Image (cartoon, helix red, strand yellow):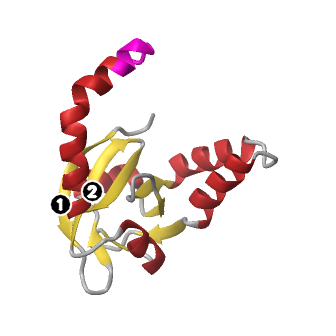
Amino acid sequence: MEHLLIGEYEHTLDEKKRISLPKAFRTALGKRVIVTRGLDNCLFVFSRDSWGKIAEKLQSLSFANVDTRGFNRFMLSGAAEVDIDDVGRILIPDHQKAFAGLKKRVVFTGVSDRVEIWDAETWYRYKARIDKDAERLAKKLGEIGAL
């Protein structure tokens, strides 16, 4: 893995749908990123290299399977290649802004090989639920040998 993306940062979406990518993530992601619909009503942001690996895995799955087709459509058709401008901002396409319910306040979270973009209110509700469930999740991961 090239860079480990970690941390949580709150920023504001401007009136032109641009948002400043946290400086901690800019170096790791490069000058162009892939933004796509993510899971749990957030957006996923990948470096071009990481996205290439994801796209390759998706393409290797059988298109004869209905679930594979659906997930490929979800991830790939929702993706956009986005430039990071000179001051570190990215433009969030309208369809992605609507999908994630992004309003004014936005939270960036680093999750290993990707950054997630959340509407702040949605993130804080989700985080409160996960925080309460951490013990059970850790136990479950331990049972399958992941921890």
Q: Position of residue 83 (x, y in %)?
A: 44, 71
Q: Are marks 2 and 1 in contact (CB under 8 Å)?
A: yes
- Quarter of the image containing the N terminus? top left
- Give the residue at mark 2: 108
> Which residue is at a point 31% across and 18% down the rendered structure image?
139
- Is 102 inside the magenta-drawn segment? no
Q: Which residue is mark 1?
A: 10
Of 135 and 74, nearer the camera is: 135
Circle 2 sits in a helix, a strand or a loop, which is it?
A: strand
Residue located 46% across and 53% down the image: 46
Q: Quadrant of residue 123?
A: bottom left
From where the camera sits, is residue 82 visible? yes
Q: Identity of the amino acid at label 2?
A: Phe
Residue 147 in view here = no
Spot occupied by residue 25 in the image (x, y as percentages of width and height): 30, 52
x 39%, y 59%: residue = 41
Q: Answer with mark 2 or mark 1, whichever residue precedes in sequence.
A: 1
The amino acid pointed to by label 1 is Glu
Mark 1: secondary structure: strand
Give the magenta part as a residue range: 140-147
115 in relation to 141, above or below: below
- Of residues 48 and 132, the one drawn nearer to the viewer in this rendering: 132
